[in-house]
Amino acid sequence: MIELQNICYSLDDKQILKNINLKFNHGITVITGPNGAGKSTLAKIIMGIIKPTSGRILYNGQDITDFSITQRAKMGFSFAFQQPVKFKGLKVSDLLRLASSDKNASLAQYITSVGLCSKQYLSRELNGELSGGELKRIEIASVLARNTQVNIFDEPEAGIDLWSFSGLVNTFKDFQAKNNTIFIMISHQEKMFELAENIVLISNGEVIQTGKREEIQDLGKLYKSCKGCGV
């Protein structure tokens, strides 16, 4: 379990997150809210990419607030960025081979799980010739290949057409059910809300509401009414 205790974050005297208290158990949690509400900042804090101004982060009871992204990765944390990183000179197969927790696993299964043809993509280089949507799916495949206990996805739908994203939703659902891991997703997609076991609604750097989908009344109306000012 991941527990956030009174997490605050400020940048240039602007308060981005305000006393965030949340718990993440095994299953899929979707964090949603308007643009600029502080969702991506919160995801990066959980991963250790940035450090909170105040508050604590506990993982299975251990205080990891000061742990670096490298330390958290070694503990079993994975992160998929909203804008995937390009790796000049590195092929898709190289990335998946490095990421895979099972060195005997077929690399093709990872790439096909995100809707790409293994014969067409495994030998391709991770450069500007790939579209943003293709890079996004390859990055998601690399996270799934790691098979870690904590998987954080920042807007996995970004740059992916809705038809392809529907397939990814099923991939996420099947993977989580099989491995019983913690999935934390930043998303605006209704399909993700339907998939989530828990939804967190954030606006203006604060948690407005949290609970199962059926417990959050008029989620769409609440989302549209929020006016965020964070980053």
Image (tube, grey):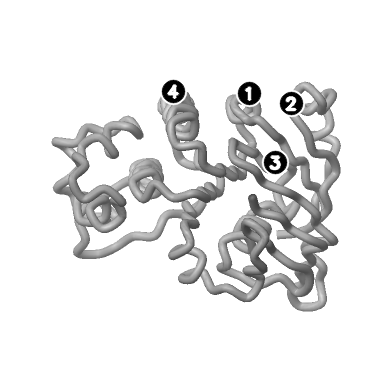
Of the residues under marks 3 and 1, which one precedes in the sequence? 3
Kind of residue sitting beneath label 2: Arg
User: Spatial distance from mark 2 to mark 3, Cα to Cα?
Assistant: 12 Å
Whether residues under marks 4 and 2 lie with C-beta atoms below 8 angstroms apart, the answer is no
The residue at 59%/43% (across/down) is: 185
| Left or right relative to 157: residue 101 | left
Which of 6 and 10 lies nearest the eye of the viewer?
6
Residue wearing tag 3 = 32
- Contact, CB < 8 Å: mark 1 with mark 2? yes
Q: Quadrant of the C terminus?
A: bottom right
The answer to which quarter of the image holds residue 212 is top right
Q: Where is residue 141 in the image (x, y as percent from the top left)?
A: 35, 43
Residue to which mark 2 is pinned: 213
Looking at the rendered structure, the kind of residue marked 4 is: Trp
Please provide percent x and percent y for residue 59. 63, 59
Q: How far apart are marks 1 and 4 (CA)?
A: 16 Å
Foreground disc of the pair 2, 3: 2
Decide if residue 112 is on the left or right side of residue 74: left
Look at discs 4 and 2 and give the one toward the viewer.
Answer: 2
Q: Position of residue 87 (x, y in %)?
A: 29, 63
User: Label 1: how many residues lie within 10 Å, few (<14), some (14-19) or many (20+)?
Assistant: some
Of circles 3 and 1, the one toward us is 1
Three-letter residue code for mark 1: Glu
Tag 4 residue: 163
At mark 4, the secondary structure is helix
SS under mark 3: strand
Q: Earlier in the sequence, mark 4 or mark 2?
A: 4
